[in-house]
Image (spheres, rainbow, N blue to C red):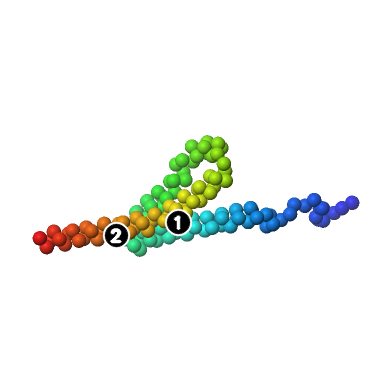
Amino acid sequence: MTSSTEPSSGAEPSLWRHRDFRRYLSGQAASVTGSAISSMVIPVLAVLEWDTTTAEVAWLTFLGQLPPALPALHAGALANRHSKRKQMITADLVSAAAPAGVPVAAAQLDARAGFNLLRKRVLLAS
């Protein structure tokens, strides 16, 4: 009679030995870390760089939560018809590219502000 504490001879090998699992785990860790950092950094940048009010930061945070919530029902129906792996890769690429738009938008706002300041100076000088 064998004890229940002894490992059986047909035990599954550790997940750490599977290359696909290690790749998946490292990718998900990077994705979760990036999401956590961006959820903290974007409101801080809004306060420090754009001098936003508390209400504007609250709206920014609220609007940041909408994209996952709005298409959830339709996305579930579509997800059943397509490859899960491609969906996960596409979602991670889109979520990685979205924060890259923040510096671009900030640069455009700074350029517009500079243009408006220049225009006001020209109009005042005339």
Do residues under tags 2 and 1 come within 8 Å of each other at their CB atoms?
A: no
Numbered badge on residue 126:
none
Please report the residue visible at 34 percent of the width from the left and 55 percent of the height from the top: 105
Q: Is residue 95 visible?
A: yes
Q: Is residue 54 visible?
A: no
Label 1 sits on what residue type? Ser
| Residue toward you, 73 or 114 | 114
Please report the residue visible at 40 percent of the width from the left and 49 percent of the height from the top: 63
Check disc 2: other Cα within 10 Å, few if <14, some if 14-19, many if 20+.
few
**The quarter of the displayed image where residue 27 is located:** bottom right
- Is 7 displayed left or right of 32 in the figure? right
Please report the residue visible at 45 percent of the width from the left and 56 percent of the height from the top: 39
Q: Position of residue 116 (x, y in %)?
A: 22, 58
Q: CA distance from mark 2 to mark 1?
A: 23 Å
Q: Which tag, 2 or 1, sits closer to the chain's start?
A: 1
| Residue toward you, 68 or 59 | 68
Numbered badge on residue 39:
1
Label 2 sits on what residue type? Asp
Numbered badge on residue 110:
2
**The quarter of the displayed image where residue 126 is located:** bottom left
Eye-nearest disc, 2 or 1: 2
